[in-house]
Amino acid sequence: MSHDLHTEFMALAISLAKQGLGKTQPNPVVGAIAVKDSVVIGSGFHAKAGKDHAEVLALKEAGAGAKGSTLYITLEPCGHVGKTPPCVDLILSSGVTKVVVASSDPNPLVNGKGLAVLRSHGIEVVEDVLRLQAEALNTGFFSRMTKNLPYVRSKIASSIDGRTALANGDSQWITSEASRQDVQQWRARACAILTGVGTIHKDNPRLNVRNLDESDQPFRVIADTHLSIDPEAQILKQKNIILMFCNDPHNKASQLEAQGVRLIPITSKDNRIDLEVLMQQLASLAFNEVLVESGPTLNGQLLELGLVDELIIYQAPIIMGGNANPLFHHPIMTSMEQKIRLKQIDIRQFGEDLRMIMQVIKA
């Protein structure tokens, strides 16, 4: 089969994988299609951890027709027993003669092993078809597997002069309803939404996803060094709440735990939560993607420590003035060598606003 056809069918598998975004954690999103005589005879995507993997669904739909077919998968098939049986076993028994994958699986339990098994049984394997496009769907999974850190996006709404709130704290609303609606998709695909207790004190947000069942909401993680949060805060009336703290001078821990809040102690650094340890803790909870929705202090600290991978900035066509809060509270730079470089990934319009997605370039 030609390279062009490989690309065409893999693009279809990638489009299927996208349907799992925000639903499969801690697993990656994966799509698969079975093709015979240039006709798709089976397709599927991984919908939830513990449910059938994409290639299993595609082969089940293909049935007996899978014999002699080509299987396209966006991620290397597993060869170990997890919550489901090894996918390579079904591929071998199905009679598939060629497997085309977009990317190898960074999970040490899988990495290269699944493809090696297929090759050892005489199945032709083609790799790296639309690899970058496929890996872009699983940046968090790849980050957690290779760096022991989640992939972190900071979402910020700002004026055209780079301000995020007036000096008196007023910030509702800087951006349009169209921008705020777009934020919902980023919240929905995140395993966790991270904020600081200062944002809870100031805005009393819920940080939930509209029109999504409570059980399907992402975890909300609050960095609260001294456990100063108001137990009546709106965010605490929901499920999936984690408070990360260093000490409890106000003796609130028992009350918060009784409310269903999970408390996780974190070591301190410079009299505040050690954010590097916090991120490692989030990775240990199997969180792939984290969306930060906070004020300039936490945003600046995370950026300074190199813990932010991507910025999502919604810029409104307004000017808020010099005494308003900036995007980041960041140490003063005295040389251009200290600048933080960004790579523009995407820019598009929502209502009157511009949404800019930028990747942080790290040394």
Image (cartoon, rainbow, N blue to C red):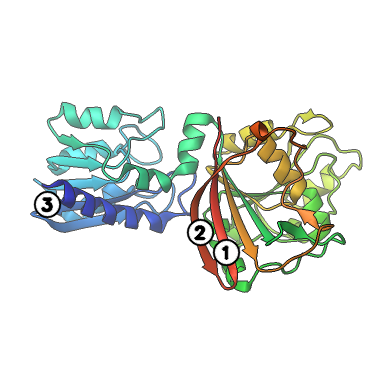
Q: Are marks 1 and 2 in contact (CB under 8 Å)?
A: yes
Determine which residue is flagged by label 1: 354
Q: Amino acid at mark 1?
A: Leu
- Residue 57 relative to residue 355: left or right: left
- Residue 279 relative to residue 222: left or right: left
Residue at 51% x, 35% y is 144
Q: Position of residue 171 (x, y in %)?
A: 77, 64
Which of marks 3 and 1 precedes in the sequence?
3
Q: State the CA–CA distance, disc 1 to disc 3.
A: 51 Å
Note whether residue 216 is visible. Answer: no
Q: Secondary structure at mark 3?
A: helix
Count of residue discs = 3
Q: Are marks 1 and 3 in contact (CB under 8 Å)?
A: no
Residue at 53% x, 67% y is 349
Determine which residue is flagged by label 3: 64
Determine which residue is flagged by label 2: 347
> On the image, which quarter does residue 342 sit in?
top right
Note whether residue 32 is visible. Answer: yes
- Of residues 26 and 171, which is closer to you in this image? 171
Q: Amino acid at mark 3?
A: Ala
Q: State the CA–CA distance, disc 2 to disc 3.
A: 46 Å
Q: State the CA–CA distance, disc 1 to disc 2.
A: 7 Å
Marks 2, 3: nearer the viewer:
2
Q: Amino acid at mark 2?
A: Ile
